Image (cartoon, helix red, strand yellow):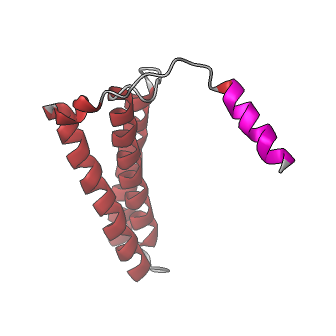
Amino acid sequence: MKSRIIVALALTLVSFGSAEAANVAVIASPPGLLSVVVLVFACACVVVGLQVRSIVRGGMLARSWQLLVTGFALLALVQLVRLLHDMEVLALPVWVVPGLLLLMTGVFFYGLFAARQTLG
């Protein structure tokens, strides 16, 4: 009981920033809508990739599928961060989204390279 009160007080003290409403109208704009569509497809690709990885578990292509699923998960994370930033819910430096996109691209290429190396 004591710890809950302390945690509640600590959270209250930390959250003294100004409270502003999120800009939800960003989702209705074409770039925001495209980000939502990419987010949904990336999540679907993660689910399908996990199913395929469970099928090839222990096989030679398991590592490449794991990397591809990681790439799609990073893409979903990038789109979620971009939407939260555009809706002004999350304040991040400008280099975070391009940095995550660069990391996602590197993971995709490494996964494709691993699949090519395995199949070649």
Looking at the image, residue 29 sits to the left or right of residue 84; the answer is left
Q: Looking at the rendering, which quadrant does residue 53 occupy?
A: bottom left
Q: Residue furthest top?
A: 18
Is 11 left, or right, of 50 in this rendering?
right
Q: Give the x, y percent position of residue 111.
A: 39, 57
The quadrant in which the C terminus is found is bottom left
Vertically, is 21 above or below 34? Answer: above
Query: Is 110 drawn above or below residue 50 in the view shown?
Result: above
Residue 65, given in percent of the width and then of the height, sits at 39, 66
Please say whether residue 7 is one of the residues in the magenta stretch.
Answer: yes
> Picture coordinates of residue 30 (x, y %)?
13, 33
Which SS does the magenta portion mostly show? helix
Q: Residue 116 location in percent, x, y?
A: 32, 63
Vertical comparison of 12 with 45: above or below: above
Q: Nearer the viewer, residue 34 or 115?
A: 34
- Residue sitting nearer the eye, 47 or 18: 18
Q: Is residue 18 visible in this depiction of the protein?
A: yes
Q: Which residues are magenta?
A: 2-13
Query: What residue is drawn where x is 83% and y is 46%?
Result: 3
Residue at 43% from the left image edge and 56% from the top image edge:
70
Please name whichever residue, 82 or 50, is drawn nearer the observer in this view of the structure: 82
Q: Tell me which residue sits at (71%, 25%) in the image.
A: 13
Residue 24 magenta-highlighted: no
Q: Is residue 56 visible?
A: no
Query: 2 or 66, which is in the foreground?
Result: 2
Residue at the limit of the structure toward the right, as seen here: 2
Q: How many marks?
A: 0
Q: Within the image, what quadrant is residue 104 found in?
A: top left
Residue shown at 29% from the left, 48% from the top: 39
